[in-house]
Image (cartoon, helix red, strand yellow):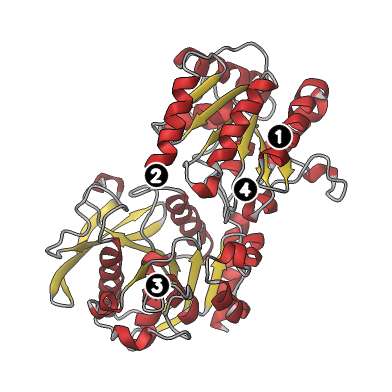
Amino acid sequence: MRIVHLAAEFAPLAKAGGLGEVILGLPREQARISGEVEIILPKYDFIDLNKLENLKIEVPDFKCLEYANAMWSGRSEGCSVHLLEARHPAGYFHRGKIYGCEDDIARFLYFSRAALEYLKVKKEPIDILHLHDWHVSICAALVKDLFKELKVKAIVLSIHNVEYQGKCDISDLDAIGLKGAAYLSKDKLQDDNPKFPKSINLLKGGIVYADAIVPVSPSYAQEILTPEYGFNLNQTLRKHQAKIKGIINGIDQKIWDPSHDAVLIPSYSVESAIGGKQANREALAKKFPLAVKKRPWLGAVTRLVPQKGPELLEAALEKTLELGGAFLLLGSSPMPTIQEQFDKLKEKYKGNPQVLLHYEYNEAVAHLIYAALDFLIVPSHFEPCGLTQLIAMRYGTIPIVRATGGLKDTVFDCEDSKVPVNQRNGFTFPEATAYSMNQTLERAFKLFRTEVPIFQSMIRRGMEADFSWKKPAQEYLRLYHRLLG
């Protein structure tokens, strides 16, 4: 089976968030199980080419529209990796970053078409063309309407976050060789938001034209069918509901492994978790500095965007201090108003040895925080999958989460009698409100102080759970086989 993934990120080379980790973990596990897997992404100017094995210019010159391109190929993590060098005069991928350019739509539309031009040059049959998010969703329409000579048996679209849809004008489709006006209809790419009747929605195009749609958790797959979580695409998703299957993400258990983590001081196993976590807490306290007096440590490693509930994180900080705990936050916001709000908080709690607000993301600090915390708070308004709660459990940190999306599918409340005891691994709260969250924080801190054996059994449960890509990769392969008949 030949599987080709198209994406904007691939963690070893270009990572902005969780998508990059997915495009590492899933293809690598698929390659281990089923053989050859390929990944195509842009050749960003910041990529360290030394991270690729057997690197060569595979196709030195091929056209996309009137512009020349080249394809570099090598190997990474057991997969064939292709880097599209776009020689477009706008320098689309020579910006020093993945996202955040005013012409992101044009950049990824061009990448999508150029990637298919490369596949056409190769003339090799493709069993599964797997697309990830809006950046490459247009490939589904391109394959079926413009690249009919491409031998693609089935197209799969993974939706990592339906909020981001890639909205643009018909002229943007014209620019890559499609007749944009022909796609401005409800059954094609016309945006479902009645306020923008002349807008094209690229993610919708993927939903309409793909053969299967995979939201990244079963609960999220149901939630996006509703007006509250569908971001105006719920009606289109309902229309194509038969194609939808939610599959939960995994995490890279080699990167996130407290027993072999070079950052930790010291590394620790399930058996040595209590002492190991305390030692890492002391190391973190020296670095920042924080008070290490025995008290519950609650924290978050997150982007500060509305989805993640920044107002609830502020409320959690206040509640934690009220309950005598320590609060740690690693993350920043791309939104000036939210960042300003948290800058003011940092000034307010300046010098407080029970508060760490660190807005410069650092991978090593993230590892230390996961190891040092007792509890991780994830108060998301919605969460397609979430990796942070899985990483936390891997490090013996108990998650406290809002029961939504992938959080609901992976964290089960320790007091929920409907869940078998051996599956209870955290705390959940139903509503994205300070009241609902604070009640749960009180429960968690009480358990920490009065039910030590239960607390320690939950640590063990989380650390022993299998959150790897083994099971999700098998589910994807079963889906592929079903599509191929």
Q: Which element type, helix, strand or loop, lies under badge 2?
A: loop
Dot 4 or dot 2: first in sequence order is: 2
Q: CA distance from mark 1 to mark 2?
A: 26 Å
User: Is residue 26 something one can see in this rendering?
Assistant: yes
Q: Nearer the viewer, mark 1 or mark 3?
A: 1
Which numbered circle lies on residue 8?
none
Q: As drawn, is 376 to the left or to the right of 200? A: right
- Circles 4 and 2 in contact, beta carbons < 8 Å: no
Which numbered circle lies on residue 467?
4
Task: Name the residue tied to disc 2.
Answer: 335
Q: CA distance from mark 1 to mark 3?
A: 39 Å
Q: Nearer the viewer, mark 4 or mark 1?
A: 1
Residue 130: quarter of image: bottom left
Amino acid type indicated by mark 4 = Phe
**Residue beneath the point at 54% across and 13% down:** 353
Dot 1 or dot 2: first in sequence order is: 2
Which numbered circle lies on residue 438?
1
